[in-house]
Amino acid sequence: MTRPSIARRASPLPPVPPLQASRGARRARGRGAAPRRWNPARIGIYAFLLCAALFFLLPLYVMIVTSLKPMDEIRQGGIFALPLAPTFAPWRQAWSGACTGAACEGIRTGFANSIAIAVPSTILPILLGAINGYALSFWRPRGADALFAILLAGAFVPVQVMIYPLVRVLALAGIFGSLPAIVLVHVVFGLPVMTLLFRNYYRNVPQELFHAARIDGGGFWRIFLHVMLPMSLPVVVVAAIMQVTGVWNDYILGLVFAGRDNLPMTVQLNNVINTTTGTRLYNVNMAATILTALLPLALYFASGRWFVRGIAAGAVKG
């Protein structure tokens, strides 16, 4: 007699048809995905975000609709009402015909001055801040921590405290009230923040990359120009948006240091609003305000993706 086998080979399971498998996967996903419920915390978050959005967007809406209304329609009230007869005449007057004191040339002169101020006042601090951050992160010169502490302290010094000393220094140098003077002032006040941004960004770069470049014979400038700077585009965009916004929106430094022939757009806007020839033209004032804020807004919306990448890459993290 043959002895029965103790262990029997397990027969393979029959294959599951594709249709049944897909249905089973959908049922499993349906059981695993919890439905989104509106609890008090979620409602509070959305309510806060809605209020914050209205807080910023409602004044912008009022400015836009007011700038498109003629003065007769503005006098009828209805600040939130849409314009019945939209017109761009206030925009043309704000750009080329609004009075800023005795001259009625609009704010186009201030726009050209702001461009002339903002371009070097953005490029120079970013370049110098990138070099400082690169040196403090990789080369570690003697006294690097003390130098970084001094630069960081400079970022928290109020602008108003430094105005009179800078006036005296620039007057002794013979450049007070000129374009180089206002550019130099913006470079001085922007350098600490730019150094902080680039130093924190480069601290997240692996040290092995720097050591490999050193082994390949790279020096200070070669590593900076060919290795570090090309990979710094996200933080450069963050720094450019911050610096352009700060320089473009500045009023007090431009008023004090720029001189009569180089007044930026914000100073011209103040002159337009405070200059009245009988009737205050609210539509022209609103149009001039929007024109003044247009360039920083356009810059942010055009490079917002890079701005988020720079933030996520550690541009403002320690």
Image (tube, rainbow, N blue to C red):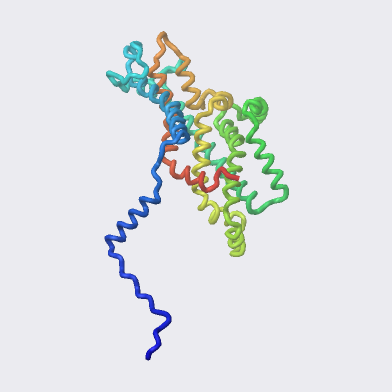
The answer to whether 83 appears left or right of 262 in the picture is left
The answer to whether 239 appears left or right of 76 in the picture is right
Rendering coords of residue 24 (x, y %):
33, 57
Please give the name of the residue rendered at 52% of the width and 49% of the height, measured from the top-left corner: 232
Q: Name the quadrant containing residue 108.
A: top left
Considering the image in quadrants, where does the C terminus appear? top right
Please give the name of the residue rendered at 44% of the width and 30% of the height, measured from the top-left corner: 47
Query: Vertically, is 42 above or below 145?
Result: above
Rendering coords of residue 193 (x, y %):
59, 39
Considering the image in quadrants, where does the N terminus appear? bottom left
Rendering coords of residue 57 (x, y %):
41, 27
Query: Vertically, is 179 above or below 151?
Result: above
**Label tally:** 0
Query: Vertically, is 274 above or below 219?
Result: above
Q: Nearer the viewer, residue 65 or 258?
A: 65
Q: Which of 228 and 84 is in front in this view?
A: 84
Please give the name of the residue rendered at 50% of the width and 40% of the height, measured from the top-left corner: 240
